[in-house]
Image (cartoon, rainbow, N blue to C red):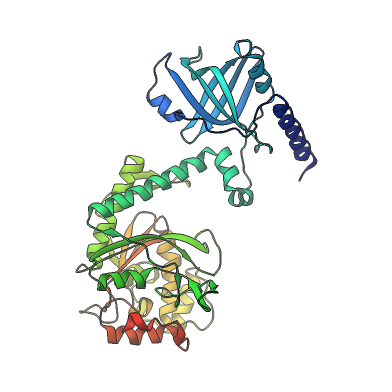
Amino acid sequence: MSEDKSTLMEIRRQKLEQLRQLGVDPFGGPFLHTESSAEIRARWEEGRKVKLAGRIVSHRDMGKSQFLHLQDRGGRLQIYVQKPSLSEKDRAVFDLLDLGDILGVEGSLFTTKTGEPSVRVENLVLLTKSLAPLPDKWHGLVDTETRHRHRHLDLISNENSRRALDLRVRLVRYLRDFLNQQGFTEVETPMMQTVAGGAAAEPFKTRHHALGMDLYLRIAPELYLKRLLVGGLEKVFEINRNFRNEGISRRHNPEFTMLEAYWAYSDFTGMAQLVEEMICGAARELTGGLKIPQSDGSELDLTPPWPRKRYRDAVREVAGADWFELSPADMEKRASHLGVELEPKLAPAEITQKVFEKKVEALAVNPVFITHLPAQLVPLARLNREDPTVVDVYELIMGRQEVSPGYSELNDPILQAERFRHQVGEHTQKVDTEFDS
């Protein structure tokens, strides 16, 4: 801790004792029947009495006139305090306030000469004394590492972070409503499993002492959701937490949220259409349109219908019409010429996938469904009847990354058991024998 921060915290602790000497609880009780700053703005009426609670994030001292901003979930709202109009005790409390303190006020609405909506304070209550100073008030929390490790500080100081959180909450609410309206049933499946199945990933391991057995945090909900299909739930979905004990990057986190849905009697084309409608609806709900500006200055255009393109056609467009006729050595040379780095001794399908990831997926801004992937890439999907070397699958790519895969699910239990065992190789303990039977 820096010396300056330590000194500031000591001063705040001294103020804490002064408040107690005044008979004020620095960590007071409830402040009921308040309105949020957003609700107040929405129901604006000059002179209307309101109650507002929030964190002090700015303070402008004009002598007898004091202007502060309180920040709550709905944003910021200015409050105006005339110190001479306060009681002697409230004046003493006001003089002990700091940025970061949580304050409750009662007063009437008015608009300042500069046109800023404000609350003329008549009574105030200290709800929580903050013992640590806020991040720099002009620049907010700018260090990326600190922001990620201290999200509460990030939310206090960065409006964009609060806006992103609000968008996420609204998005999840929309997704639930959309799927419910489509007849899907929301379910919850086990997060601790005896076999970590449904994906190829390294699980986190834990121990259940009462049962004397090892368990795994789920890497995917797939197999339990499919059990529900077997049980007769024809449309199911889950918004769930998954855990994968692997690398960390901007696109990979050891703990993450996934929406997974299953639809009996449909196929990958039906699911693709559902996903397209769902994402377009979410965009309209959250942004008001289908053309969304990106942080790099580009624009994401979600206008339907979204193109469907076969995997091999997409690869040929970037790697050459003769790509799939090349020898492995020639594939390596051309991949190198395209700027794609390869590990040694990759199989042709693996080389092709590397080219796809770097030259198709990583460059696709607007949504595109890549369909009919090679069978070896998606071993538990249904083989295409016309071309058994590919499977009936889509991968939705947008914003230069895959955001949704969809399968026509393999439902042949004998073939599925064979593919399970081929997928895990010698690690047969990773096979969920109850499911594949």
Name the residue at 22% across, 68% down: 264
Q: Is residue 252 visible?
A: no
Q: Position of residue 345 (x, y in %)?
A: 51, 84
Compared with residue 60, is residue 274 higher up or lower down, i.e. above or below?
below
Compared with residue 216, is residue 58 higher up or lower down, i.e. above or below?
above
Q: Is residue 2 visible?
A: yes
Front residue of 44/232: it is: 232
Q: Position of residue 403 (x, y in %)?
A: 39, 60
Name the residue at 61% across, 52% down: 149
Which residue is outermost to the bottom? 426
Q: Quadrant of the C terminus?
A: bottom left
Horizontal side, residue 142 vs residue 275: left or right: right
Compared with residue 99, is residue 212 higher up or lower down, i.e. above or below?
below
Compared with residue 273, is residue 196 higher up or lower down, i.e. above or below?
below
Indicate the quadrant where residue 18 lies: top right
Horizontal side, residue 230 vs residue 95: left or right: left
Front residue of 399/74: it is: 74
Count of marks overlaid on the render: 0
Name the residue at 53% across, 64% down: 254
Q: Position of residue 72 (x, y in %)?
A: 51, 33
Front residue of 11/277: it is: 11
Q: Position of residue 66 (x, y in %)?
A: 61, 17
